[in-house]
Amino acid sequence: MKDIPLAGLLQKFMHLLDLRVRYRIEGESMQPVLRDGDEVLVDEKARVGIGDVVIARHPFKESVEMAKRITAIDANGKFFLVGDNSDESTDSRTFGPVSLECIKGKVVARLK
């Protein structure tokens, strides 16, 4: 399981240049890597792959955004998203794989 590094000066500077988007984590589904209330920086242009933590739009509730880890990519290019704390996570085990259009970006750093 990949950890999310603490944001350094470069990531903070990129945020100031609007090259990173700030998100606040809600809920316990990504513990222990991300906790409720943590703030993260997201690269909306990064390529994503298996093992990456991403911010994604819920496939059936468009107003809901969630942090999940990519655990698989199927033959149709859809992403299987799972929370690290599986007991507290609603994820692809419930709603199925999601398309790339649902993925907002890759979590690249945590803010303290």
Image: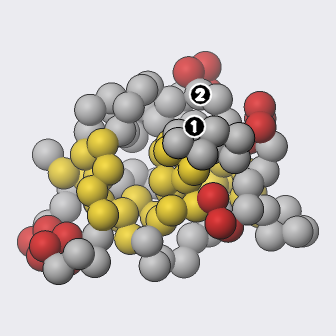
Residue visible at 85% across and 62% down in the picture: 74
Circle 2: element type? loop
> Whole-percent x and y of residue 3?
39, 51
Quick check: 60 left or right of 104?
Answer: right
Q: Are marks 1 and 2 in contact (CB under 8 Å)?
A: yes
Residue 86 on image: x %, y %: 61, 27
Kind of residue at badge 2: Ser
As measured in the structure, the alpha-carbon distance from the residue carrying label 1 to the one carrying label 2 is: 5 Å
Foreground of the two, 4 or 106: 106
Which image quarter: residue 4?
bottom left
Crowding at mark 1 (Cα within 10 Å: few <14, some 14-19, many 20+): many
Going from N to C along the chain, the mark reached first, 1 or 2, is 1
Which disc, if any, is residue 89? 2
Residue under numbered circle 1: 83
What amino acid type is highlighted by mark number 1? Gly
Q: Is residue 51 visible?
A: no
Residue 57 visible in image: yes
Task: Please provide percent x and percent y for residue 103.
Answer: 58, 61
Callout 1: SS: loop
Foreground residue among 79 and 58: 58
Q: Nearer the viewer, residue 47 or 51?
A: 47
